[in-house]
Image (cartoon, helix red, strand yellow):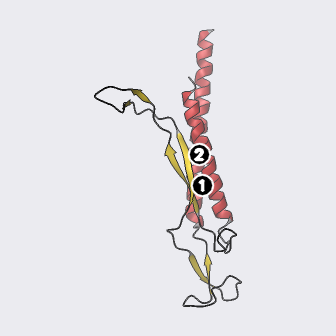
Amino acid sequence: MFKAINIASTGLSAQRLKMDVISNNIANATTTRTTEDDGPYRRRRAVFQPVNLRTRWKSPVYPFGLRTGEGQGVRVVKVERDENTPLRLVYDPGHPDAIKIGPKKGYVEYPNVDIVSEMVDMISANRSYEANAQIIAGAKSMFQAAMQIGR
């Protein structure tokens, strides 16, 4: 009876964490020095994974069990740093974090955060969050209607 609410709640918590990660990326879009590695901030992203499907039954034909395709929700496996996207280079020789020697002398390495793509991801996560909230509201109204029928 509460399966739909449980599944939607996993989506709510996962999308909320994704919005928190995106907000952190936007807040650090100009951070040129961090305490973790003394370099510029690196964009982070939440990695989702479906919650394992339950096995319905096992047989000699299907020794690992037959899965019904029934989902159990989603969870955040980890929040990882984006090491593949290159950092932005901006020429600013007066900046305290400007590169002092080499061919990139005078350039400052800025985070690999693209504000436009972060905002698009934020809108997508927000809409997914709202969709999961609507599922919970719909399930709640169905349960209330079912209770009225029983009276």
Mark 2 or mark 1: which is in front?
2
Q: Establish if 142 lies above or below 17.
A: above
Locate the N terminus by quadrant.
top right
The answer to whether residue 10 is seen in the rendering is: yes
Secondary structure, mark 2, is: helix
Q: Could you say which is closer to the camera, residue 145 or residue 38?
A: 38
Q: Count the labels in the image.
A: 2
Q: Establish if 122 lies above or below 11.
A: below
Picture residue at 63% right of the left edge, 49% below the top:
17
Q: Establish if 122 lies above or below 35.
A: above
Q: Establish if 25 lies above or below 126.
A: below
Picture residue at 62% right of the left edge, 14% below the top:
148
Indicate which disc residue 29 carries: none
Q: Residues within 10 Å of mark 1 (few under 14, many from 20)?
A: some
Secondary structure, mark 1, is: helix
Q: Could you say which is closer to the camera, residue 5 or residue 75?
A: 75
Quadrant assignment, res 111: bottom right
Pinpoint residue 73: horizontal percent, then vertical percent. 52, 38
For label 1, the residue is 122
- Of label 2 and label 1, which has the lower sequence position? 2
Picture residue at 59% right of the left edge, 59% below the top:
119
Q: Could you say which is closer to the camera, residue 59 or residue 140?
A: 59
For label 2, the residue is 14
In the rendered view, does 44 fall on the left or right side of 94?
left
Tell me which amino acid carries mark 2. Answer: Ala
